Amino acid sequence: MKAFSKVLAVLSVGALAAATAAHAADPAPIRLGTVQPFSGSLAVYGHDTQPVIEYLVGKINAQGGIKSMGGAKIEIVSADDGGKPGQSAAEARRLITEEKASVLLGTLLTNHSLALSPVLDEYKVPTLALFGAGSKSPYLFSLGLPYERGYAKSMVDFLDYLREKGHPVKRVVTAYSNYEGAQQVNLAITALLKQRGYELVGDVPLDMKATDLLPAMLKIRSLKPDAVLGIRLRPEAVKLQRARYDLNYYDGVFVEATGGADPAFWADLGDDVAQKALLNNTFALSLYSPAALATARELAAEMDSSGKLNDKFGQFAVSAAQAVLVIKNALEKAGSTDPEKLRQAMAAVDLPLGHPDMVLPRSGGVSFADDRLVKDGSTLVVQWTKDRTTEVVSPAKFAVTTPRVSR
């Protein structure tokens, strides 16, 4: 009995030593900090994207983690910036210094990106924004659409396409949420309209504190435009479309930004308003369509069946998914969380159309230009259908139908 006890003790010590050695050999986890608006007027962005980030990180970990780093797992540490630029910077600093995040990801708009730049420069932490643009930091990359080759070009190209289809479009009004990013996009839109021979008949910045936008819509109606373009965030887009409904005004083509193609947009308007406003001469830029890419369609099916989404899989979700996959590829390429190696790896990411980690519908794939924004900033243009889904009308490579325009 004593001999058996000694053997058992030796085996226990040996097993403990082996377990300790195995644990010691496990690579350190990679801390991914997410700076998201979970409260405030932009909370919809955070609540729509965070479940996708968590789902895909869990999937990457289950499939063996980051293989070039010995299977290191990714750990998410999150922060709520309340949609406020100053809070974005403060939370980023906290995630870096206290939570030891090696890379950051967030739904940063342009003003958030600008506020974040000094923090990133100080700590040299690579960061990937989902929607923002115009950062001054060499450490901040973005999947957001560039002002000119993204938002502006996609909108004006669509007007050109309507002309090709025989729809008379000449008089244009710009109407946009009155913040810096939308203002900059408006400058790019204005320049392109003039270059291509359109008549700019009005410029209508939208008050982001207004309870309704009926006065703005009255001004737009008085200008009798053939088309209304501009970057309108969800709150302003909803208010402007409600004003169209209240005035029963459906003349001219309204082109919304990417928020106008998301399922939550219909829900925010309510069925009565959406059935009229969205089905009459309304189009929207979109980063997602089930018909566009098989990789995105398969991921959407996974996510929708998982029960983790707040709404159906849409373009905010696909942007979040692409961001996680870009970070995964950058980590694999870098083989390290060294800030400079990771920054260089991020700059070198190249996911061509057809790559299994490419889910955004861009014929040029996903890679970054010297300004750290995506090289191919093109986007889909969609129209709504009666069953609350969208269908792609442009560009031709991804289109499934023709634009539905009435006068």
Image (cartoon, rainbow, N blue to C red):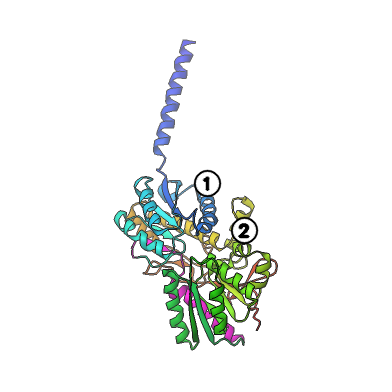
The reply to whether dot 1 and dot 2 touch (C-beta < 8 Å) is: no
Residue 306 position (above or below residue 364): above
Q: Nearer the viewer, residue 20 or 162?
A: 162
Q: Is residue 395 visible?
A: no
**Quadrant hosting residue 275:** bottom right
Q: Residue furthest top?
A: 1
**Which class describes the residues within 10 Å of circle 2: few (<14), some (14-19), or many (20+)?**
some
Q: Which residues are magenta?
A: 136-165
**Quadrant hosting residue 217:** bottom right
Amino acid bearing label 1: Ala
Tag shown at residue 312: 2
Q: Residue furthest left?
A: 122
Left or right of 337 on screen, residue 55 = right
Q: Nearer the viewer, residue 76 or 173?
A: 173
- Answer whether residue 192 is magenta in the image: no
Residue 205 position (above or below residue 264): below
**Residue bearing mark 1:** 62
Image position, residue 182 (x, y; %): 45, 71
Left or right of 188 on screen, residue 338 = left
Q: Tell me which residue sits at (65%, 78%) in the image.
A: 404
Foreground tag (1 vs 2)? 2
Left or right of 152 on screen, residue 372 = left
Amino acid bearing label 2: Lys
Where's the C terminus, which quadrant? bottom right
Magenta segment's dominant SS is helix
Left or right of 370 on screen, residue 251 = right
Tag shown at residue 371: none
Image position, residue 322 (x, y; %): 50, 60
Secondary structure beneath disc 1? helix
Image position, residue 142 (x, y; %): 43, 64
